[in-house]
Image: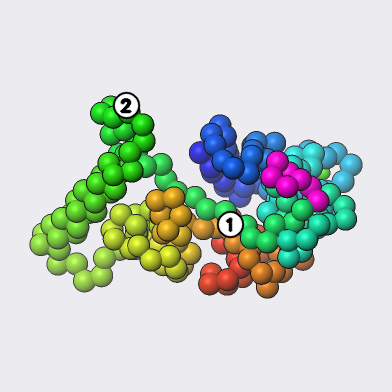
Amino acid sequence: MFSVSSERNKYRLGLGIYTAGTAGDSLSYHRNMAFSTKDRDNDNANSFNCAASYKSAWWYNNCLRANLNGYYYHGSQVKSGYRGINWGKWKGAYYSAKRAEMKIRPPLKCLNVHFNNYYSGPANKDIKVHLLKIENQLADLEKKIDALTENKTTPPAMKNCAELYKSGERITGVYTIDPDGLGAFDVFCDQKSVGGGWTVFQKRLDGSVDFNNRGWADFRRGFGNLNGEFWLGLD
Ligand SMILES: [Ca+2]
């Protein structure tokens, strides 16, 4: 589980229990922390602003065990801890990652139910593929029924990249979504990694976009380029 609360609630970070991963859990330390920027000190360090000290915006505690918004150092060692794109449990506080991506996806409810109720053996790739196929066929049928029952000219935008994936959009790239019916906007969808359907909200890959000289307003609104580096925006 991953969530970010409203601006009124300071974009607090909601996290479930860490389950698995090859880089280790460096984010639990930041669970339930508010978002801090150089101009908004919402952290647990009483005497100073972590975001100002570490020159980047993040869900600081007192202060950090990971930060994917740090300075871009092209993968090199950094002289003082956590000044780059760091993930403590992975390569420690002094190694700055070359690439970082943060992305979310709603839980695959149908698949889990099927696995839990009907399949107790080892994970079987074929079954998963088969279920995905059936899911897609159902989505196609749904679309056809919609088209037959009403004369829609333009279909409404999908809620997220997972819905786009289900509807047959399998190419990674920029799509238009409308998560809550309050207005459509563009996002980058990762339709390839671990099953696809990921809405990417942060990406670092070459240091081309400045992540560090920005305040609350920028992180609320978002910045960068969806085809390169970007922060989608907390709003
Ligand atoms: Ca503080």
Residue at the location (58% across, 57% down)?
Answer: 101
Q: Please state which amino acid type lies under the numbered disc 1.
A: Glu
Q: Earlier in the sequence, mark 2 or mark 1?
A: 1
Q: CA distance from mark 2 to mark 1?
A: 33 Å
- Residue 91 covered by magenta stretch: yes
The x, y position of residue 206, in whole percent, is 66, 69
**SS at mark 1?**
strand
Q: Which residue is mark 2?
A: 120
In magenta, the rendered stretch is: 88-94
Q: Nearer the viewer, mark 2 or mark 1?
A: 2
The x, y position of residue 72, in whole percent, is 74, 64
The x, y position of residue 152, in whole percent, is 19, 67
Residue at the location (61% across, 68% down)?
Answer: 229
Residue at the location (88% across, 55% down)?
Answer: 79
Residue 228 seen from this side: yes
Q: Which residue is mark 1?
A: 101
